Structure formats: structure tokens, C-alpha cells
Amino acid sequence: MNMITFMFATSLALSIFLTALNFWLAQTNPDPEKLSPYECGFDPLGSARLPFSIRFFLVAILFLLFDLEIALLLPLPWATQLQFPTTTLAWTSLLILLLTLGLVYEWIQGGLEWAE
């Protein structure tokens, strides 16, 4: 039996075993609390036209901005091996400075205050 066949058989057997174990150990009588819908802390049975705070969107946009920053800064260790690493450092510093100034501006304006 070659190595690929052995690995395939092992992974198939492990998958079948774990699936069977899941069905065997699963909770068969879930309580009503687990079956009720959960809508981010809001009552799902109330009116659908309740005012929604814009601060949720602000936090989501800030998360996306800083997540994008991490994605842009990730290749920096390899960028230092370029012909002009000082240019890379300057652009990186400019990006971090711009995002930091935006965060400070939001902080000063009170946009990050959750309670009014």
C-alpha cells in the first residue's frame, strides 16, 4: 500500500469516526433558550423598525480600516530587501501616521464614546 492510499484511508476513517462521534454525543433535547433566535442583543420578537445606533457601523468601519492596514503592512519584512528600503519605510510611516491621525480625530470628536 503506497503512502497516498494510506493517508486517504486514514483521513476517511478519521472523518467517519468523528462524524459518528458527533451524532452520538450531540444533545438530543435542546432547551428553548438555545432554539430562540439571537439578534445582536436586540429583542427579535419586537418591532423591526427600532432605531439602530450608527455607532455599530462606525466600529465596523474602524475595524475594516485597521484590518486593511495590517494587510498592507504584512509584506514589510520582504520589502526591506528592495533596492531602496528607505522609500518603503517612508510610505509605511506615512500610512501609519495617516491612520493614527484619523483615529485621534475620531477620539477627540467623541465618535468612539459608546455611552452618550
Image: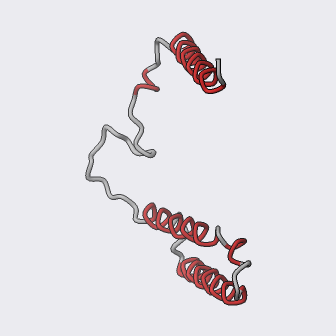
Who is closer to the viewer here, 21 or 42? 21
Quadrant location of the N terminus in the rendered image: top right
- Residue 60's spot in the image, x, y percent? 48, 62
Who is closer to the viewer here, 39 or 3? 3
Picture layout, residue 51 above or below residue 93: above
Identify which residue is drawn at 68% across, 76% down: 79
Who is closer to the viewer here, 8 or 74? 8
The reply, left or right, for residue 34 in relation to residue 80 is left
Picture layout, residue 13 above or below residue 79: above
- Which of the 4 image quarters holds residue 93? bottom right
- Residue 78's spot in the image, x, y percent? 70, 72
Identify which residue is drawn at 70% across, 86% down: 83
Picture layout, residue 100 above or below residue 41: below
- Residue 25's spot in the image, x, y percent? 57, 13
Identify which residue is drawn at 30% across, 42% down: 46
- Which of the 4 image quarters holds residue 16? top right
The reply, left or right, for residue 57 in relation to residue 91 is left
- Residue 28's spot in the image, x, y percent? 47, 12
Exactly how many numbered labels are in the figure? 0
Who is closer to the viewer here, 2 or 43? 2
The residue most toward the front is 2
Q: How is the image coloured?
A: secondary structure
